[in-house]
Image: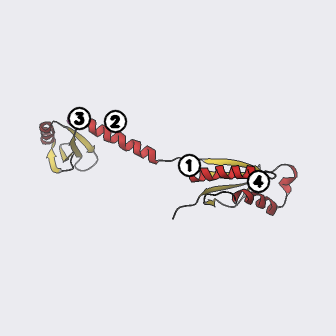
C-alpha cells in the first residue's frame, strides 16, 4: 500500500479525471464536484495517479482499494524468484553412487531455477594431472544430470581445482 495515496479532502488538485469503481469514466471534474459525487454514492475519492495531467481519481470504497493493493503486492512477491548459486563438491575418486546422488540434487536445483556450481576438488598429485583427465572426471557427473542445462562458460581452474557453473537451459 502506497502511504502517499490521498483520499477525499487530502487531495489538492483543482481538477481530476474521475472514474468509478466499475470503470466508467466520468470525465474531468473539479475537486468539489468529484467529492460531491463520491459523497452522494457513499464512497471515497481516491487519487490513483497523482502525476497524470490532470490527476486520475477513482470513486470507490477505501477499504476495498487497500485490499486490492495488498493483493497485488502479494501476487508480485509470489511471482518474484531469487536465483541462488548452489555448490556441489566432487573429488576425483567419488564413487558412482555418490555422483548419482549429487547429480540428482543438481537436477532438482536446476529445475527450481538456481545456478549450480560444480567444483572438482583436487588434492595432492591430482592437481598436476592432465587437463583432459580432469575434464573427463568432471564430465562423469555432468552426464548424470537429468535436467536440461547449459554451461556458463568453460571449466575454469579454481583454487580448489576445476569448477564449472551450470544454469537451466532456456525454454523455447
Q: Please provide percent x and percent y for residue 135.
A: 76, 60
Q: Mark 3 points at which residue?
A: 10
The residue at the point 25 percent across, 36 percent down is 62
Q: Which of marks 4 and 3 is in front?
A: 4
Secondary structure under the numbered disc 1 in the rendered image: loop
Q: Which of marks 2 and 1 is in front?
A: 1
Secondary structure under the numbered disc 4 in the rendered image: helix
Residue 50 placement, left or right of 134? left
Q: Which of marks 2 and 3 is in front?
A: 2
Secondary structure under the numbered disc 2 in the rendered image: loop
Q: Considering only order in the chain, which callout, 3 or 4, is on the residue closer to the N terminus? A: 3
Q: Is residue 142 above or below residue 16?
A: below
Secondary structure under the numbered disc 3 in the rendered image: helix
The residue at the point 20 percent across, 34 percent down is 9
Q: Considering only order in the chain, which callout, 1 or 3, is on the residue closer to the N terminus? A: 3
Q: Name the residue under label 2.
A: 3
Q: Considering only order in the chain, which callout, 2 or 4, is on the residue closer to the N terminus? A: 2
Q: Please provide percent x and percent y for residue 82.
A: 53, 46
Amino acid at each position: 500500500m502506497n502511504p502517499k495515496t490521498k483520499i477525499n479532502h487530502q487531495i489538492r488538485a483543482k481538477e481530476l479525471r474521475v472514474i468509478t469503481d466499475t470503470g466508467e469514466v466520468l470525465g474531468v471534474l473539479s475537486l468539489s464536484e468529484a467529492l460531491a459525487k463520491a459523497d452522494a454514492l457513499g464512497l471515497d475519492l481516491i487519487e490513483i495517479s497523482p502525476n497524470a495531467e490532470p490527476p486520475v481519481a477513482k470513486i470507490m470504497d477505501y477499504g476495498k482499494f487497500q485490499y486490492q493493493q495488498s493483493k497485488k503486492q502479494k501476487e508480485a512477491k509470489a511471482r518474484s524468484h531469487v536465483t541462488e548459486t548452489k555448490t556441489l563438491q566432487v573429488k576425483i575418486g567419488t564413487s558412482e553412487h555418490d555422483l548419482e546422488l549429487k547429480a540428482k540434487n543438481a537436477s532438482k536445483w536446476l529445475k527450481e531455477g538456481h545456478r549450480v556450481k560444480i567444483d572438482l576438488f583436487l588434492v595432492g598429485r591430482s592437481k598436476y594431472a592432465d587437463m583432459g583427465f580432469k575434464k573427463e572426471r568432471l564430465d562423469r557427473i555432468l552426464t548424470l544430470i537429468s535436467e536440461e542445462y547449459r554451461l556458463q562458460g568453460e571449466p575454469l581452474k579454481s583454487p580448489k581445482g576445476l569448477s564449472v557453473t551450470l544454469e537451466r537451459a532456456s525454454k523455447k
